[in-house]
Every structure is written in C-alpha cells, then in structure tokens.
C-alpha cells in the first residue's frame, strides 16, 4: 500500500513565522500535491510537483511556496504565516503514467496560526 | 475545465438503510471519476474509481458507483449502511487527456450521519 506521511498532525504557529509542512511518500511517485481543506470549500490545490525540482502553481498559491529536492519529499512553506492560513493541509502523491491513477493522501496537518 | 457538483451537503440515514450520494460532473470527454471518503481528522481514502469499461464499479467497504454518461453522473451507493460509514464523501473528476491530466477537481463533499 502507498504510504504518504505528513510530519505533523497538529501545528500551532504565530503570525509572521515561517512555517514548514513536510510530506514523504514511499512509493516512488513522481507527482506530489499540496491541498488545503476548509469547511464548505472542499479541497483546493495549492501547488503541484510533477517531478524532482519541478513545481507548478495550483489554484491558490498566494502566500505559499514549495520545495522538492528529493523525489520522496515535498515541502510546503508559508513564508510569513497569517491567520487566514489556518486550515487543514493535505498532501497527496500519484504515479503520472495515466490520468486514471488516483491520488493517495496523507492524514493531514491541522495548522493554526495565532 | 472540469467541475464537480455534489448537491447534498449533509445526509442522514438510519443504520441498515440504503444510501445514495449524488455526484454530477462537467467535462468535455470521458472523464476519470473517483470517490474518496474522509473520516474525522483523517486524510482521504480512495473508495473506487472509474476510467473505462463496465459503468458499474465496485469499491471497498461494500460501496459501488455507476457512471451514467447521459446524465453526467457518478452516484455512490451502498445497500446497507453501517455506523462506521459516517464520514465525509468526496467525488472527484480527472481529465483523460491534455496537459492537465494530473489534476483532480473535487466536489465540496457530502457529510454522512448515520443514526442508530
């Protein structure tokens, strides 16, 4: 089974801090994703990486950046955290060979910015 | 661009009753379709997927879904709901071609409550 591991389940940070959310997958998947999930809004794609050192903006990239230095690890960075970035963050990975391949999700990081 | 609509925000059923969760999609060609389930505080787990062939697909935990091209629908069903099925359910559509075939578009979810 695919295992996608997010380093923290819960995280509390202060406004203005630089925040790192880490995600690791163990299935040698090229594609990795970061979403945020908010009540009533569903899942929204922040950033996508189709391979090492490759990244593409999703639907809501403002205020975020990402890093993909190794295939198994995809980091989401909040350069200067703000209260409106309080949310559930979900990481996912998939094989890129066909669009039919599903995304596999981690358990999420619930981030609170005070 | 593809889109997904889950018309029901919240559904309540009694344990043992049948269940149908609705999903309508918009996409110009044959889409790839997925149903995910999210238990409280957890990530999303894949229930089933459709990309070709038999329009009735079976998934895990006794769920099935039927692809109906004429209605642009992919409704999720279960004949007898268990209390452990209480969760939020997400329908998603993926492009079958083009440069954005990595992308999934999710519906906003349907929250399922199961009464004893």
Image (cartoon, grey):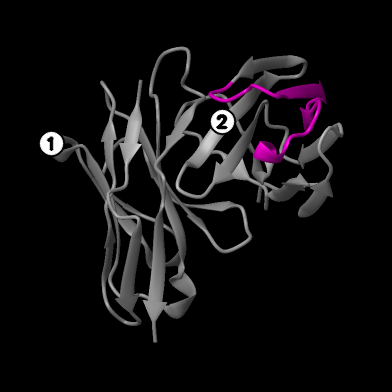
Give the left or right position of residue B102, taking residue B89 as reference: right
Q: Is A94 placed above or below A47 here?
A: below
Magenta span includes A71: yes
Q: Is B70 placed above or below B99 here?
A: below
Between marks 1 and 2, how big is the CA–CA gap?
Answer: 29 Å
Q: Do labels 1 and 2 touch, CB within 8 Å?
A: no
Residue furthest out toward the left:
B70
| x then y, percent, for residue B11 | 32, 65
* In front of the other: B98 or A98: B98
Mark 2 chain = A
Residue A68, picture quadrant: top right
Q: Which residues are magenta?
A: A58-85
Q: Which residue is mark 1?
A: B70
Q: Which mark is residue A73?
A: none
Residue furthest out toward the right:
A17
Q: Which residue is mark 2?
A: A45
Magenta span includes A74: yes
Give the left or right position of residue A14, taking residue B100 as reference: right
Q: Residue at x 42, y 13 (%)?
A: B98
Residue B24, picture quadrant: top left
Secondary structure, mark 2, is strand
Q: Residue at x 56, y 51 (%)?
A: B44
* In front of the other: B81 or A114: A114
Question: Which corner quadrant holds the N terminus of chain B?
Answer: top left
Q: Residue at x 74, y 22 (%)?
A: A65
């Amino acid at each position: 089974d695919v295992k996608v591991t997010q380093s923290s389940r819960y995280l509390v940070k202060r406004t203005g801090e630089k925040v790192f959310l880490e995600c690791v997958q163990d299935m040698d998947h090229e594609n990795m994703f970061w979403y945020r999930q908010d009540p009533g809004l569903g899942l929204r794609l922040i950033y996508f990486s189709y391979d090492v050192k490759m990244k593409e903006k999703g639907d809501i990239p403002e205020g975020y950046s990402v890093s993909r230095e190794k295939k198994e690890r995809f980091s989401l960075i909040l350069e200067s955290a703000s209260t409106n970035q309080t949310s559930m963050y979900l990481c996912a990975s998939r094989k890129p060979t066909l669009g039919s391949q599903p995304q596999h999700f981690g358990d999420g990081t619930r981030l609170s910015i005070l | 661009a593809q889109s997904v609509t889950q018309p029901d925000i919240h559904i309540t059923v009694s344990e043992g009753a049948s269940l149908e969760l609705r999903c309508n999609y918009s996409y110009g060609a044959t889409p790839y379709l997925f149903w995910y389930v999210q238990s409280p505080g957890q990530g999303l787990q894949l229930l089933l997927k459709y990309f070709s062939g038999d329009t009735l697909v079976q998934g895990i935990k006794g769920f099935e879904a039927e692809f109906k091209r004429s209605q642009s629908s992919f409704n999720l069903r279960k004949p007898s709901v268990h209390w452990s099925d209480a969760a939020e359910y997400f329908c998603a559509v993926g492009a079958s071609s083009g440069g954005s075939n990595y992308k999934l578009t999710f519906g906003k979810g349907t929250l399922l409550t199961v009464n004893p």
